[in-house]
């Protein structure tokens, strides 16, 4: 059942969800450009750093699996206002971390509480926004990635330069406290999904509901597509900063420009891609972008000999294509869910994505090596693996069945 909001209330809702996503995305993304500093500070290898990145995503995956058993039994607003402040507390713990072990523990907590936020946001969009406008609505929420790269990551790195690596996490904790207050005002309760079935029967048990989600072949195809989508990018993305500094000769102060340029381009392109996917069709738009994805992935891993301008062009194209796929891709995945179990489905999907991100980061870290000069080696192999995953997502997208009830 769709909740109808006034245009003004809808805009405020999307802005709130984008703000929540912004802090969640920034908390995850800021770890990647900190790679050179953290590997030196804690004396760890690229593989160990990959495990630090993966700890967040594995915890988010576990959180999603647990949440899928109960998320449809509570109002969306209540869930959001419980998990989001706890995520802020975990970010504060990251800002206080004095050792690798403490930081690892804090990252696990951040992933555990933050892992469900994206699923909740996407579920709310799917339940509030009609399908014919959902591409544009999803593009608003997904611009959180662009804003995080345009403003969040560069500003966070400037905080690191002027203070230390703890400062960005403190800033995230402060932003969470502000955005949580806004969420109290703007989020609808969305409790319709917890009502008893209209046929007068008893509501399915927690495990029965989860079983119904997992045994639906269409759901399984959507999970496989979702997994391939995120694996494609995260086999390469976590190691861009290490690669640019070790192989391309980038200085630490030049790294923010990679995220700034990439973020500006994705911010401009996201709205265009959202409108394009609504006009041309979500499946058509997604398949075109998934087919394109292997090229900038491989280009990024072979860009060490390019001038700085060339590296920025290649990395910006990668950011645009990688984030652009998610707009029609998530609209398709949300529409493939059984409306009666959409919350459980989207939470499981978030868990699948998180686990796939963690697996991609770990596999990518194990593929990488170092030569005698300290350069990263075999990075292009990670790009080939990610490109193969993107092509598989292309195939899976054509096999999804969309529920008509979600398109009204």
Image (cartoon, rainbow, N blue to C red):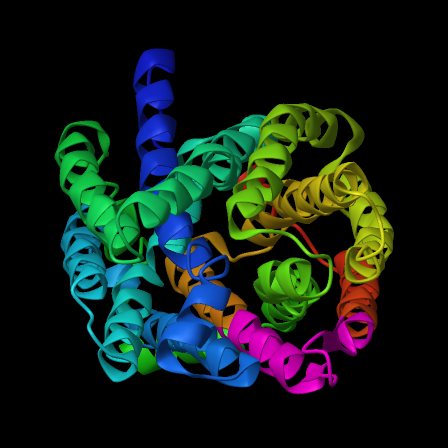
- Say which quarter of the image contains residue 376: bottom right
Residue visible at 54% across and 57% down in the picture? 337
Q: Residue at horizontal 49%, vertical 29%?
A: 140
Q: Position of residue 307 (x, y in %)?
A: 81, 43
| Left/right of residue 14 with respect to residue 78 in the rendered view | right
Identify whether 280 is placed above or below 233.
above
Name the image quarter holding residue 194.
bottom left
Residue nearest the viewer, comparing 398 with 173? 173
- Where is residue 368? Give x, y as percent: 69, 81
Residue 30 as seen in the image, left or right of residue 70:
right
107 w.r.t. 295: above or below: below
Q: Is residue 1 magenta?
A: no
The answer to whether residue 275 is visible is yes
In the image, what residue occupies the spot 30% across and 32% down?
16
Task: Magenta stretch: give its range.
Answer: 355-382
Q: Is residue 178 left or right of residue 43?
A: left
- Identify the image quadrant of residue 100: bottom left
Predominant secondary structure, magenta span: helix
Left or right, 201 with reference to 223 = left
Q: How many marks?
A: 0
The foreground one among 276 and 132 is 276
Residue 186 x/y as whole percent: 22, 28
Vertically, is 116 above or below 314? below
Residue 205 visible in rendering: no
Does the magenta-highlighted stretch encompass residue 378? yes
Image quadrant in which the N terminus is located: top left
Q: Residue 126 at what x, y percent from top left?
A: 46, 41
């Amino acid at each position: 059942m769709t909740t109808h909001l006034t245009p003004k209330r809808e805009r405020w809702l999307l802005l709130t969800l984008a703000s929540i996503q912004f802090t969640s995305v920034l908390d995850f993304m800021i770890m990647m450009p900190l790679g050179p500093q953290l590997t030196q500070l804690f004396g760890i290898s690229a593989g160990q750093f990959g495990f630090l990145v993966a700890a967040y995503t594995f915890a988010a995956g576990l959180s999603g699996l647990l949440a899928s058993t109960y998320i449809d039994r509570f109002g969306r607003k209540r869930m959001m206002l419980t998990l989001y402040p706890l995520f802020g507390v975990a970010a504060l713990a990251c800002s206080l971390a004095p050792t690798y072990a403490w930081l690892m523990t804090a990252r696990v907590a951040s992933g555990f509480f933050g892992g469900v936020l994206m699923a909740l946001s996407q579920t709310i969009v799917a339940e509030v926004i009609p399908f014919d406008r959902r591409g544009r609505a999803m593009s608003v929420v997904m611009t959180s990635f662009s804003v995080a790269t345009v403003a969040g990551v560069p500003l966070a790195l400037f905080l690191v330069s002027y203070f230390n690596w703890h400062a960005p996490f403190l800033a995230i904790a402060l932003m969470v406290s502000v955005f949580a207050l806004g969420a109290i005002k703007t989020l609808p309760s969305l409790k319709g999904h917890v009502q008893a079935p209209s046929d007068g029967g008893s509501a399915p048990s927690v495990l029965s509901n989860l079983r119904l989600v997992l045994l639906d072949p269409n759901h399984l195809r959507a999970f496989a597509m979702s997994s391939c989508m995120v694996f494609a990018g995260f086999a390469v993305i976590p190691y861009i900063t290490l690669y640019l500094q070790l192989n391309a000769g980038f200085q630490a102060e030049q790294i923010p420009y990679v995220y700034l340029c990439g973020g500006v381009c994705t911010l401009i392109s996201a709205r265009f891609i959202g409108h394009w996917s609504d006009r041309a069709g979500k499946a058509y738009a997604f398949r075109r972008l998934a087919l394109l994805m292997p090229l900038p992935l491989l280009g990024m891993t072979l860009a060490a000999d390019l001038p700085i301008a060339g590296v920025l062009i290649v990395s910006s194209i990668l950011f645009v294509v990688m984030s652009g796929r998610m707009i029609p891709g998530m609209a398709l995945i949300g529409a493939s869910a059984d409306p009666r179990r959409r919350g459980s489905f989207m939470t499981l999907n978030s868990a699948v994505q998180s686990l796939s991100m963690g697996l991609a980061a770990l596999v990518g870290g194990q593929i990488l090596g170092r030569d005698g000069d300290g350069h990263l080696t075999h990075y292009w192999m990670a790009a080939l693996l990610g490109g193969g995953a993107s092509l598989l997502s292309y195939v899976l997208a054509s096999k999804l069945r969309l529920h008509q009830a979600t398109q009204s």
